[in-house]
Image (spheres, rainbow, N blue to C red):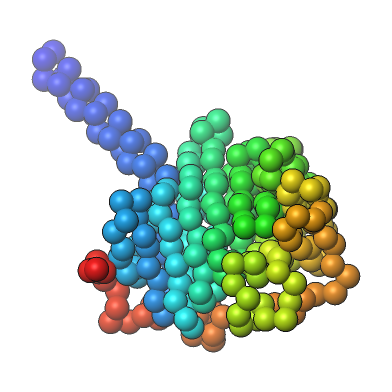
Amino acid sequence: MRPRVASIRASTLAFLLALYGATALAQSATVTHLVGTLSVTKADGSVRLLSQKSRIEPGDTIATERDSFAQIEFADGARLTLKPGTAVTLERFSYAEEKPEADAFVYGVLRGGVRAVAGIIGERSAERYVVRTSGGTIGIRPAAAVASTEGVVHVGRRDIDAPIRAATFTVDDCMSSRAGECAGLQAAVFVAVADGQAVARNPQGEVGLAAGQVGALAANQRPLFLANDPGLQFTPPATFIQSIMTGAVVNLGRSLECIVAR
């Protein structure tokens, strides 16, 4: 009996370890595509240069350099694609397929621009998908958007039994930087909805946006619906698009992480 008991205990331990590993993996994201330079500043202040397959964890601030694009993928299917000169902080991410009560996805766009595709968390846990920007908060979802108080927008669908659909939107911060494409534009954070509906909110109010519409969040005024597209572009180079389509490694020869010494 003792060998059998030992075997059962070993099997149980192996199962628990596997379960723990799956849970740990669902609290991070992965760099899936990269052209140029992507760095991460850890919570302790250390800085690393990243490559494809690098892990992004809560508390990390990732930043692209000039002429650089990066795509980050999360365990729930969500994706963030960063434009050049962009910085994003992953404040919190937690996903387990069988534990919707543990869902959490909070990130902040500190500067630059991103293209975001919401995943399962955005579909089934509306109140736990949060996007922050310097102008307020923005969010999007295919069927509906629910805004909360104090400048936070939650993304998700109430009907969790309905088929999953990806919500897609872009965010461009023209408040933190007035250079490049932002020169000549209003000092605001712009959100353009590609699919679904969005709600943007700041202390002065909120605005709803449908697919194909653009809104702006500026300081000390209500969010605005824009009749005309401000002309901000999201056009990665052909090599980056090709890497996404084919899964090819673009930064060949630079596939290892390295620590940046100060």
Can see residue 233? Answer: no
Pick out the residue farthest to the left. Answer: 3
Q: Nearer the viewer, residue 132 or 146?
A: 132
How far from the left and from the top, in percent, is residue 77? 54, 54
Furthest toward the top, the residue is: 1
In this orientation, which residue lies closer to the viewer: 164 or 140? 140
Query: Does 48 appear above or below 77?
Result: below
Name the residue rendered at 48%, 41% in the picture. 94
Rendered location of residue 195, percent (x, y): 75, 61
Is 202 placed left or right of 244 in the picture? right
Residue 228, above or below 103: below
User: Exactly how many numbered labels are in the figure?
Assistant: 0
**Residue furthest out toward the bottom:** 238
Could you tell me which residue is drawn at 15 percent across and 21 percent down? 6
Q: Position of residue 53 (x, y in %)?
A: 36, 64
Note whether residue 78 is visible: yes
The reply, left or right, for residue 3 in relation to residue 87 is left
Q: Quadrant of residue 258?
A: bottom left
Furthest toward the front, the residue is 220
Q: Could you tell me residue 247's position as x and y percent?
A: 45, 74
The correct choice, above or below, for 170 with respect to 92 in the image is below
Relative horizontal placement of residue 126, taking residue 261 as reference (left or right): right
Quarter placement of the C terminus: bottom left
Q: Is residue 127 found left or right of 199 in the rendered image? A: left
Write the residue at 32% across / 41% down.
21
Residue at position x 70%, y 69% in the image:
187
Quadrant the N terminus occupies: top left
